[in-house]
Image: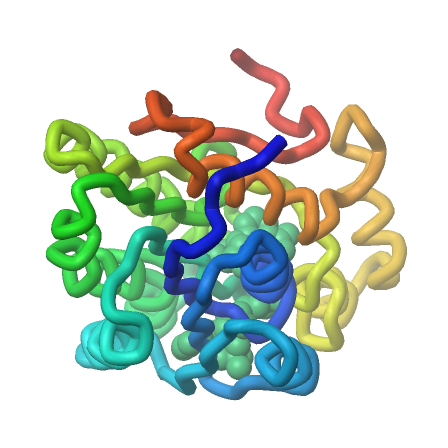
């Protein structure tokens, strides 16, 4: 299927690793000029940028003005934006329970998982509207609908993020900007499986090994496995494409059947 993406421009946040890197790679393979943002480029994104139309813009999206500065840089590099992928996010398992989660913890979680997307979208929207037809795809999480005390602040932030995207879709849809979310279950990235990922952090708090924690999480899905970053990227690309021109305000779970309700 031709996604008709060739010649368009995209901004991807959290692009140096994991899902964001897979999205950046996928868009570049489709002929999209991509502005890729993360605090540090990392070897894989640097290698990709050396051989494809990928511009790396180092950015800290947890700062109040980081997102707007990133969008300004992206527009200066590409001349305009057709696609925004709000992918940046982070999670810290709260193995000490709710009472251990401080105001600073809540603020940090809400900032990187909600406000970073709000601010990036605010800065990018005038440019997306200018195109007459554009797409915003935001990476939320199954935790938006599966609140979990282990990630109590992250669950709340992702629920707010999905709500924000749904509301925005109603405002900007009539003007040609589609807004959708994808909600992955566990994905095989550093966020879950890295040395400071969910599995290792839970293991360090006592009990099962990191491998057991990951095995248990995989087993909770009907398919019995983690989603691969490239599989999330494929879904994001379809939503970015005009192949899904009448899809807006929608959320797509990609979780191997983990969410068991309708
Ligand atoms: N992996 C999962 O199981 C899973 C499941 C559901 C939803 N998600 C969501 O999917 C998205 C991507 O997750 P992932 O698993 O790919 O995570 P990841 O492997 O940890 O990658 C996170 C990316 O965000 C960047 N980043 C982190 N803090 C940043 C900051 N302050 N400013 C700019 N960039 C920053 C990181 O680069 P730097 O560190 O260099 O900045 C990296 O490129 C997140 O929104 C996450 O909540 C993931």
- Whether 202 is drawn above or below 159: the answer is below
Residue 201 position, x and y percent, is 69, 68
Query: In the rendered view, would you say 156 is above or below 52?
Result: above
Residue 61 left/right relative to 121: right
Q: Can residue 147 be seen in this snapshot?
A: no
Badge count: 0
- Measured from the top left, where is residue 73 in percent x and y? 27, 80
Residue at point 24%, 40% (across, down): 133
- Please report the residue visible at 43 percent of the width from the left and 63 percent of the height from the top: 12
Colour scheme in use: rainbow
Residue 217 sits in quarter: top right
In this rendering, is residue 216 above or below 249? below
Please indicate, yes or no, whether residue 17 appears anywhere in the rendered image: yes
Which residue occupies the extreme front position in the image?
7
Q: Residue 241, percent across and down?
A: 44, 38
Q: Quadrant of residue 245?
A: top left
Q: Nearer the viewer, residue 137 or 193?
A: 137
Q: Is residue 242 above or below residue 130?
A: above
Q: Is residue 55 left or right of residue 232?
A: left
């Amino acid at each position: 299927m031709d996604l008709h993406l060739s010649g368009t421009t995209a901004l991807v946040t959290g692009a140096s690793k994991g899902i964001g890197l897979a999205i950046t790679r996928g868009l570049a393979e489709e002929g999209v000029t991509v502005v890729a943002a993360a605090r540090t480029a990392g070897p894989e994104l640097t290698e990709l940028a050396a051989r494809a139309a990928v511009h790396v813009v180092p950015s800290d999206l947890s700062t109040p003005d980081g997102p707007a500065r990133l969008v300004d840089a992206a527009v200066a590099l590409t001349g305009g934006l057709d696609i925004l992928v709000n992918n940046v996010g982070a999670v810290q398992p709260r193995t000490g329970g709710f009472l251990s989660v401080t105001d600073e913890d809540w603020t940090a979680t809400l900032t990187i998982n909600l406000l970073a997307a709000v601010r990036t979208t605010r800065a990018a929207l005038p440019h997306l509207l200018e195109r007459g037809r554009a797409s915003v795809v935001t990476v939320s999480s199954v935790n938006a609908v599966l609140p979990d005390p282990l990630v109590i602040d992250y669950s709340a932030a992702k629920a707010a993020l999905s709500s924000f995207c749904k509301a925005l879709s109603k405002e900007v849809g009539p003007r040609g900007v589609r807004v959708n979310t994808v909600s992955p279950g566990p994905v095989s990235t550093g966020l879950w499986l890295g040395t400071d990922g969910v599995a290792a952090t839970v293991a360090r708090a006592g009990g099962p090994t990191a491998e057991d924690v990951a095995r248990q999480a995989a087993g909770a899905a009907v398919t019995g496995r983690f989603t691969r970053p490239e599989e999330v990227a494929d879904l994001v690309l379809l939503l970015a494409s005009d192949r899904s021109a009448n899809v807006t305000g929608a959320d797509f779970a990609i979780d191997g059947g983990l969410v068991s309700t309708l």
